[in-house]
Image (cartoon, rainbow, N blue to C red):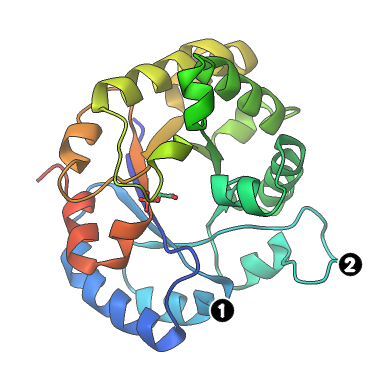
Amino acid sequence: MKRDIIAGNWKMNKTQEETKALIKEIVPLVKDANCEVVLCVPYTNLEVARKAMRGTKMQLGAQNVHWAPKGAFTGEVSAEMLKELKVKYVIIGHSERRQYFGETDMSVNARTKAALEAGLKAIVCVGETLEQREAGETNRVLAEQIEKGLAGLTKKDLKNIVIAYEPVWAIGTGKTATAEDANETIGVMRKGIIRQMFGKYAANSLRIQYGGSMNAKNAKELMAMPEIDGGLIGGASLKAEDFAVIVNYDK
Ligand code: PGA
């Protein structure tokens, strides 16, 4: 049985003090969650977040990882460094990284491999732009991102991967894909390219999240969809009560 996974993507928000305060608020509100709960915080907050989450079932996540084990890569952080901080999950290929920092399917692939080799779990993000959607290219774009982003990985690797389907036009915009649309698109990915690459069993076992303006109001409806196994939450993960409502979608 796969377990739904709700991950907060804090992006570049919160100081250490604010991190402690927010997690302190979140902890009691999510303690009875049935899903897996992950907080992906900025690198500088990993240590305080780990301490603030101690004794809870929440998991610690980062928002990126470099592909090399070490070396002359100014400003980057390796998988081993994240492991040392007890990080369990790492977001890879978020559309903001693709859009502003030149992330490509190739670099997503290299980062994902490095994360898995180090024993981290990867949340690999894919999603189409508004232009691509309007041109009817959504399914082709997603298949290409997955084919290249997960190239060379095995069925076994897939157990440590979560895919986040985040339509770029829905991120931070207040526009959500309708639950039906998101469900259908995820279904096409799962039954198409993912099954083709990894087989039916692995494809069915893979957890695929929806992300993009998922919030306290729409989470229940999105999570009720059979193909949607979780959420990657940006803005709403910065408010304890909203995040808790999302995490407790099944209550
Ligand atoms: P949002 O962000 O929930 O603020 O739209 C989601 C994400 O970018 O992961």
Image vertical order of residue 158 relative to residue 64, above or below: above
- For label 2, the residue is 71
Q: Dot 2, how many residues are within 10 Å of its Cα: few (below 14), some (14-19), or many (20+)?
A: few
Quarter residue 225 falls in: top left
Depth check: give the residue in front, 4 or 73.
Answer: 73
Depth check: give the residue in front, 109 or 159.
Answer: 109
Contact (Cβ within 8 Å) of mark 1 with mark 2 = no
| Residue 190 x, y percent position in the rendering | 47, 18
What's the amino acid at mark 2?
Gly
Q: Is mark 2 within 8 Å of ligand 1?
A: no
Q: Tell me the SS state at disc 1.
A: helix
| Residue 59 x, y percent position in the rendering | 42, 61
Residue at 36% in and 33% down: 2
Quarter containing the N terminus: top left
Residue 107 — which label? none
User: Looking at the image, can residue 165 be seen?
Assistant: no
Which of pointers 1 and 2 lies earlier in the amino acid sequence?
1
Quarter residue 58 falls in: bottom left
Residue at 70% in and 46% down: 103
- For label 1, the residue is 44
Q: Is residue 12 left or right of residue 106?
A: left
